[in-house]
Amino acid sequence: MGKTSFTFSYSKSTSNRPLILAAMMLANFMAAVEATIVATAIPTIVSELGSFSLYSWVFSAFLLAQGATIPLYGKLSDLYGRKKIFTFGTLLFLLGSILCGLSNSMYMLIAFRAVQGLGAGAVQPVSQTIIGDIYSLEERARIQGYLSSVWGIAAVIGPAIGGIIVQNISWSWIFYINIPIGIIAVFITSTSLHEDLGRLKENIQQKVKSSLRGIPDNISKIKIDYAGSVLMITAISFLLIALLEAGNQWALRDLRFIGMIITSIILFIILGIVESKARDPIIPFKLLKTSVIFFPNITSLIVGVTTISISSIIPMFAQGVLGESAIAAGFLLAAMSIGWPLASSQSGKLIIKRGFRFTAISGALVLILGASLLLFLNASSNYYSASVFIFIIGLGLGLTSTTSIVAIQHAVPWSKRGVATSSNAFMRMIGGAFGAAIFGGLLTDYIKYRLPQSQKNVDIIKLLLDTSQRKALSPALISELRNILSDAVHNIYYFLFAIVIVGLVAAYFIPREIKEEGAL
């Protein structure tokens, strides 16, 4: 059977490709800068706004809103065009950034981070889908490397900028700097990406009807799976709330915790039933359960968990345990972002020479090495040794993440690329949300357990994270708090090591060779 392949209908696509790529890189730069700057500034934000026990929600609210809306944006981009959805998502992200900067409490910041997440749900997956549309199969590995490099470059610059802003201006400006970047990306996309949706629909009606199965005859009749969307968002929300509050406000035996876990499980079961009967499901299980999609998505889940655990824990470890400044903490985190693009830029060559499975396994093994080295970090660790360990983590993430997205886009035709690409981004975001929830709960639970009976409020840790407030503490109390925080972080590393082992297993089942697009 011959291969059926066609691209999204763009006019002047060849001449506009460099500008379109620039816009997508800017959008990814904006998202990357946001992630690293917030991670660097979170100790300062906590020290000013208080509520240390809520700090993980700053990450989880964003990731939950982003992850829950990614599949929906994938469908909308197929119906109404990539440009409209990309523009809408970027502008919503900018609105959330402005509101975050105006926040005067942790609760406001968490709520507006969710608004940011609702916009970010469109930015990354739609930009990746656009790249998959306008570049050939042979070019995608190289272009995905460019996008990964943007994340790395932004993450190197982001912590430095974040540290300077936090120390010399105000943490609010870590959100305001998104505004010019987002506006430029929207302007370039609006003027350079010319979609011909009428031609697209005619193309699909003529070609898909006779060559691909399971696609509606008339694209205009495709309906959004609202029932599946609501069930998915609700089920994930119940589960994440339960995980975040476990070990913090609730004990594991708390009826509220047990009730929310049971409710989440029931909702997931109902979601599976509804999606199996839906004409055009928001989660196409038949597609996602194939090995060429399923196992790369599992590796993306591991990437999400690993990235958020390092991004949220390392700055706290550097400032609270090692006693470093916010800028130094940012550069420590940047070590991961240097290794990431270096490995990603070489992954395409490795895929072509040795195949998808070999490249994915190589990335997983490097991740395991980095995670095992983190187990040696403690209160007496050297700052530069920690940088090397985190750099190795970045190398593993670069190999693993690029391999997963290239494998998926390689296997599917245009008509399924939006859903497939969104599923990969969705799994990575959900991995980040679960990582923030689980590790945040474990961290606060252990700190509360270790604190003296006279002081069980975990907010005392914020005194250790702020240089000026730390000076007011006695040397004995500083030493005690540092040891408690160090041990708490060390326990997180054990869980991280176990998680990356799962990534190795998933990488083993990724096919070595994947049929060209149109195979699924």
Image (spheres, rainbow, N blue to C red):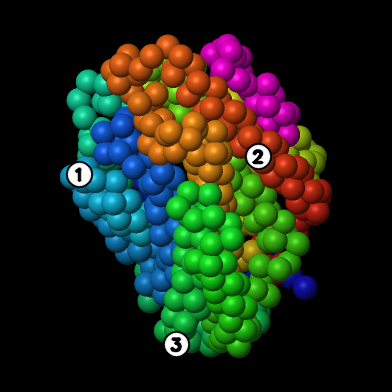
Asked if labels 2 and 3 touch by Cβ distance under 8 angstroms, the answer is no
Q: Nearer the viewer, mark 1 or mark 3?
A: 1
Local secondary structure at mark 3: helix
Q: Disc 1 residue type?
A: Asn
Residue at the spot 30% in from the left edge and 16% down from the top edge: 472
Q: Nearer the viewer, residue 311 or 265?
A: 265
Quick check: 427 above or below 442? below
Q: Nearer the viewer, residue 216 or 324?
A: 324
Q: CA distance from mark 2 to mark 1?
A: 33 Å
Q: Disc 2 residue type?
A: Leu
Quick check: 154 above or below 246? above
For disc 2, the marked residue is 496
x, y percent for residue 214: 62, 82
Residue 210 seen by the camera: yes
Q: Is residue 408 left or right of residue 102?
A: right
Displayed quadrant of residue 411: bottom right
Q: Disc 3 residue type?
A: Lys
Residue 6 seen by the camera: no
Residue at the spot 59% in from the left edge and 60% down from the top edge: 253
308 in magenta: no
x, y percent for residue 28: 41, 43
Q: Which span is picked out in magenta?
A: 366-389
Toward the front, the furthest residue is: 454
x, y percent for residue 467: 33, 18
Quick check: 361 above or below 164? below
Q: Nearer the viewer, residue 275 or 460?
A: 460
Earlier sequence position, callout 3 versus callout 2: 3
For disc 3, the marked residue is 221
